[in-house]
Amino acid sequence: MKTTTEPRPELDRPLRLLQLSARARRAAAQASVVTVREFLLIDKAAFLATPGCTERSWHEIESRIASYLAMRSGDADANSDDARPLAPLLTTPEHARQLAENGLRTVADFLACDKQHAQRIPCLRRNGWMELLEAIVRTRRQSPASVALLPSTLRNMPLCAVGIPQDLLLRFSDLGCSTVGHAFALPATMFEQGGLLGVNAAAIVREALDRLLMPALAPVDGDASDAEADWPRLRARMLAALDEDTRDWFCARIGIVDASGRTHVIPKDCSDATGIDKRDIAARNRLTLRAPSLLLRLRSEYLRELDAFEGAVPADRLAAGSWLHAISKGSGDAMLPLRLLAFCFPEEAQVDGSFVSGVAARTWQRLRQRMRVVTARRRLPITLQDLAHQLSSTLAEPPRGVVTRLVAELPRLCIRIDESRGEIVRQAEPEIARRLEQILVDRGQPTRFLDLVFEYRERFQAASEHALKARIVRSHEFVQLGESMWSLARWHRDELEQLAPVVDRICAAVSSKSEKQVLRELHDGDEREHWLLQGLLRRDARVRWLGRGEACAASLGRSRVLEQLLTDFRRAAGEVPMSRFLENQTPDRRRLVERLLRNNRLFVFPAPDRIDLLTNYPFNQERLARLSSLVDSLLAQRNGYATLASVLEEVNRCDLGGSWLHPTLLGELLRRHGPFEVLPGGYVSRRSLGLIGWLMRRARTALREAALPLTVEELLAQRPELAEFAPCLEQLLAHDPLVQTPDGQRYQIA
């Protein structure tokens, strides 16, 4: 037999895929022959000299290889038959599941499996094995002689570019067909009545190819030239193809204003019982028959734009010089070409907002629902590729343009470039941070924080210095260069990279100690370096930044001060007087201890001057969450605020309350563990309502307008809307730094 070493893929096919008998497989294994090429290279005498290799085995292998090469030779694409999935060739999904559990997912897996072993699977018993083998042979590619005359450009054209429906495209893909040449190589029985594809598939492919090739085969008339592609001429061509009644309907349906400026009104509904509009169909059919070159040109431009924007075409980004762009600019309506495409090609173009795509409206809705799940805060950041994979359960292989469109619809998300992971979807910077970033970009240099605050107020009318400071400190987009000097992190990327080894060394030193460390004792550097290091350590997960230039290991639990407090309270075995407990603290710890007792969630005030541990009361995380939910729903029914007495009355109606629960204790629980504000005088409100701020603004305005000291009664006379909060107004004014009182009874603006 003639030897060959040519790089032909059909020669690398394993012999085990040729459905040899058990005797022939054993003989090939004895002779160490694995592929078709190896059998062609071995000498017959050497094969027969091998123990267990007979003349009969030789002739069986030779005949199988001859049949295989006669069918596959010269068609390298035909080798993808073995990679076809078995599921489309089976009758039920249950059979596909049984085969998959046994490792049989593709044609190659089935052909390589021993027949006796395969027939142990329930779906392949009796005639199942032979029926599946016949289905594989029946759907196998035929001789490439049928496509030999097709030009390579058409033969290699992807089926997805032809314009066939998505469901039919998936059926072709299941059969291993990805190009027009693959589809032409399928046997004719596939397109017959009862075949895997059916007669309708052949008609759809013919119509798609007809639409694709018609512009090249049909003579080009003068009206279709690019030089005359302006809106008045295109409008005249479209309307000339319709009769008068259909023309009015078409103009009103699409939103076209004719040359006379007349606005059309859509006539009465003429839909049939199935909801199909007969006038839409009539107008579409007339355009197809009388202006085919116009529709083909629009469709060709749409497919080109769809490919350029990867699945979602925006209305304001149409290619200049195209007819779609001419329609948009000439009519002054940017959405007109999109509506026209959706009308003329309802199965290929769907308008969603200011975009047009091939995704149906219901699929868009399901994609949005799925998007909210896969981009939950706990799952971010996520690469754009992984996000598309997560959405593939709703839309198979969603185009990149569709995915980016879905991301852009959610203001909380943004796409950023990561040097190691590429495009990633992450949580967008808050609006305040984006505005501060824009101010710094406009200034072009590091800026003092107060200048940023003043600039922010000039641009956006209002700004809280505390809120701006909180945002700029937490954001990774900013770095601090001095006591009050801030800049953009990307302007100092080289400096930050040089400090990375220093940060690693400091984190290792801090993590090795069981107490807090001072930054200046761990690194000797200039002032600028220390501020940059503070910003890097503040955001590093390996350490916990304590402020004032101090840090501790992130693995450490409570501070030593807090542990000592808990020990003292356990020793007391109950509540203790707040004032006396603070007097017994050392001067260097007194301020810290007072702050912990007033704000830490481990403590609670059972009485005005009494402090106790929360663990001494029947409230765990679950009961605190129930209490917060109950109070929030109650306040929602009462304009967002109520008295603690009325809230306590509702709480005592369920198992959360009891005789031991009183307004002071309830207020402390809500203040420390819920989104609420507790006002002096026994009021509680939602924190988002900002009731304290509203009260103080009204009171300050009244004092400023009066221009002389006022008592609380005189203030309420000027602002009757504050009378409801009279019990707490005096205490709020007494603690307001912008208000002073000369005699303890009258108040004025400081």
Image: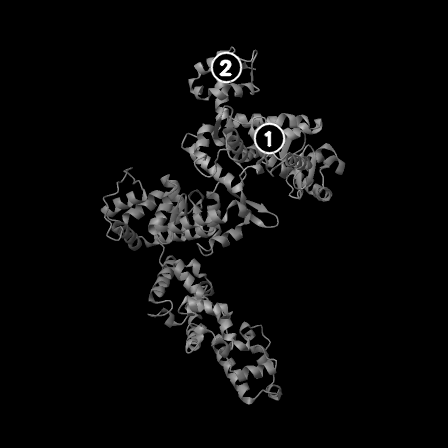
Q: Residue 182's spot in the image, x, y percent?
A: 44, 67
Query: 415 or 299, which lies in front?
Result: 415
Query: 528 or 125, which lies in front?
Result: 125
Quote the CA–CA distance across marks 1 and 2: 37 Å
Point 74% across, 33% down: residue:
526
Query: 499 or 661, which lies in front?
Result: 661
Q: In this rendering, would 236 be left or right of 316?
A: left
Query: 362 or 637, which lies in front?
Result: 637
Is residue 521 positioned above or below 748 on the image? below
The residue labelled by disc 2 is: 703
Query: What amino acid type should be assigned to the residue bearing mark 2?
Result: Leu
Q: Say which element carries label 2.
A: helix
Q: Say which element carries label 1.
A: strand
Q: Residue 112's spot in the image, x, y percent?
A: 52, 75
Q: Residue 208's spot in the image, x, y percent?
A: 37, 60
Q: Which label was assigned to residue 611?
A: 1
Is residue 478 positioned above or below 46 on the image? above
Point 35% across, 67% down: residue:
198
